[in-house]
Structure formats: C-alpha cells, structure tokens
C-alpha cells in the first residue's frame, strides 16, 4: 500500500486547478447528502456523535475531511489511514476504546480510497466516490473549516451536488472566538498566562483564518445564496438548553427519523467544559470593538437565541 505523507496546507487560491474548470455535470444522489460547514467550536463534534451511530446514517470514520480547504489527506487522516493499513484489527480496537463506530467493510474501503487519493489533484468525482458505499443511508461531511470557503467553491459544490443540504451551527461570536483562542493555547506551559495577553489575543484575532470563521452572518449569506432552502442553521444555545428537540430538528431536516436512537444521549458532549471563562477588562473592550456590530447583525438576521447575544457580557 502507498505510504501517506502530510503536505503543507494549501490556500484556497491553490484550489484554482479544480474550481477554475467548466462546471461539472450535476449528478444526483452520489457524494454527500449534506455538509455541516461549522461553525468551529459550535457543536460540530456533538453533531458527529449524534449521527455516527444513528441507523439512518453512514458517516465517514473521520469527523473532518477537510477536502476543500486543505491538502488531502490532512496529517491526522493520513496517520490514521497508515495505522489502519498496517494493522486493521489494532486500529479498530483503538476506535472502540474512544467510543467511535466499529469499522465495517465500508469504512475499510474508505481507508483504501483515502490512500489512493494521497498526492492526487483535487477532483469532485473522486471526492464523491468517498461516499459511494453509503448505500441507502444518509452520508455527510462535517468540516467546520468549510465555513471559510469562498463563493466560487461553494457555487461548484451546489452545482455538483444538487440535492445536498447544508447545516450551519451557530454560536455567539464572542464566546466562539474565545473558545477557539483557548483551544489554540492547549498544551502550552504558559497557557493560563497567555490567555489574558492582550497583544497575543489581538494577533490571534487578526489572523485571516480566524477572521473568516468569526462573522456568522457573512458565512450564512454565502452558503444560503447558493443552496437556498437546502441551507439551514441551528444554535448551540439550543443544543445546550434542549438537546433532544434540537437533535430532532436537525435529523428531520436531513431526512432521518428523529425517534431512532443515536447510540448516545442527546445531551452527550465529549468536549463540555464546566469552568466559565474569565476575560480581563482590556480583552472585553477589544471583544466589544470587534464583535458588537456582528452580535447586533446576528440578532436581526438569525433571531432566536441570537437576540440575547448583544446584551451578553464581553
């Protein structure tokens, strides 16, 4: 089997070789039935856990494929694929210990397809083939990084997968970016000190990748423009306050039976953190400067829980 090596992430502009071509012929039914395009730190892991063991779904063995926003396969997927190809039984035991879906013939075929795509140019038909073994189940790609995709890429996806739906999970932009900042610091010895470092946090907010993820009204607008009524958003606030009803809404939108069990409880959250965040006054002032207008826009555009965001603390 080929050895998979990681390659540097490529910019969105580097995908021009794929998305600069004439539109591909629309093919109904193949490829993913839905994309969950984020937001990062807004409940995408919760959604993957709810779907991976649900009887109506076949989900890839990885939550985030990153086919369209990074070099494929990413280092994490490449490493997992190499481990599987080297010792499938050992890798399957590792997945079971982490509470992930057991591997069947379809997941095994998926790993071999990933290995075959290593180092190959981006190709929508090759991507669609990753989902070819879904049979009569619903399959999807949950990759929060797709929130950063540009309109030309989104237009191509809408044309190539004309029946696919799009899910966007929303979170207060202040709380979302703070959670992303804390995640970026995980594992650093001075994480607690750097967390309140105004200069470091400002530099983080100024990163293009962070900017592209941090304004949900812009993200929703570009996906809704191309997918229309195949696009729908849901709130992390509702996942926290009423997970069972929110799960049912999402499943219904995707065409699945909400009454069927998911293998985990609706309120299962492997990433839950009980400690409330602390933000210094200078950081709160910066948050207000950057996100007060976006909070107000979210309240007007999305309604629901977003109406409470402008009055929340910074």
Image (cartoon, rainbow, N blue to C red):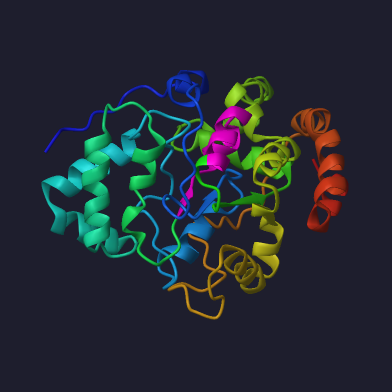
Residue 142 lies in the magenta-colored region:
yes
Residue at 35% x, 64% y is 135
Count how many numbered circles sit on residues in the image. Answer: 0
Tell me the quadrant of the picture where the N terminus can be found: top left
Residue at 50% x, 41% y is 160
Please give left or right for residue 233 compared with residue 115 in the image: right
The image shows residue 225 at horizontal and vertical percentages of 71, 40
Residue at 27% x, 41% y is 114
278 and 110: which is toward the camera: 110
On screen, residue 151 above or below 311: above
On screen, residue 293 above or below 233: above
The image shows residue 161 at horizontal and vertical percentages of 51, 46
The image quarter containing residue 52 is: bottom left
On screen, residue 249 above or below 271: below
Q: Which residues are magenta?
A: 140-159
113 and 294: which is toward the camera: 113
The image quarter containing residue 156 is: top right
Residue 52 seen in the figure = yes
On screen, residue 244 above or below 225: below
Residue at 68% x, 70% y is 242
The image shows residue 59 at horizontal and vertical percentages of 40, 58
Residue 181 seen in the figure = no
Tell me the quadrant of the picture where the C terminus can be found: top right
21 and 37: which is toward the camera: 21
What secondary structure is the magenta-colored segment mainly?
helix
The image shows residue 108 at horizontal and vertical percentages of 22, 55
Residue 63 lies in the magenta-colored region:
no
Give the residue furthest to the bottom. Answer: 259
């Amino acid at each position: 089997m080929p050895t998979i090596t990681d390659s540097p992430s490529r910019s969105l502009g580097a995908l021009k070789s794929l998305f600069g071509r004439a539109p591909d012929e629309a093919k109904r039914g193949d490829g993913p039935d839905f994309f969950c395009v984020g937001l990062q730190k807004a409940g995408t892991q919760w959604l993957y856990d709810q779907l991976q063991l649900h009887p109506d779904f076949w989900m890839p063995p990885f939550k985030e494929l990153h086919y369209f926003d990074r070099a494929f396969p990413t280092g994490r997927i490449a490493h997992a694929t190499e481990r599987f190809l080297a010792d499938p039984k050992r890798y399957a035991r590792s997945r079971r210990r982490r509470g992930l879906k057991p591997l069947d013939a379809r997941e095994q075929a998926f790993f071999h397809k990933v290995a075959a795509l290593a180092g190959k140019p981006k190709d929508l038909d090759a991507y669609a083939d990753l989902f070819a073994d879904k049979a009569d189940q619903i399959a999807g790609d949950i990759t929060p990084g797709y929130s950063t995709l540009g309109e030309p890429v989104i237009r191509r996806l809408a044309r190539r997968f004309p029946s696919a739906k799009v899910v966007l999970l929303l979170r207060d932009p202040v709380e979302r970016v703070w959670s992303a900042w804390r995640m970026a610091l995980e594992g650093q010895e001075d994480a607690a000190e750097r967390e309140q470092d105004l200069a470091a946090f400002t530099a983080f907010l100024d990163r293009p990748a962070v900017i592209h993820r941090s304004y949900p009204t812009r993200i929703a607008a570009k996906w809704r423009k191309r997918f229309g009524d195949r696009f729908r958003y849901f709130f992390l606030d509702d996942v926290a306050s009423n997970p069972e009803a929110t799960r049912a809404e999402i499943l219904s939108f995707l065409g699945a039976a909400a009454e069927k069990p998911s293998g985990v409880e609706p309120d299962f959250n492997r990433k839950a953190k009980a400690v409330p965040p602390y933000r210094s006054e200078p950081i709160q002032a910066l948050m207000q400067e950057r996100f007060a207008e976006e909070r107000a826009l979210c309240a007007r555009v999305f309604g629901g829980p977003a109406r409470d965001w402008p009055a929340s603390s910074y």
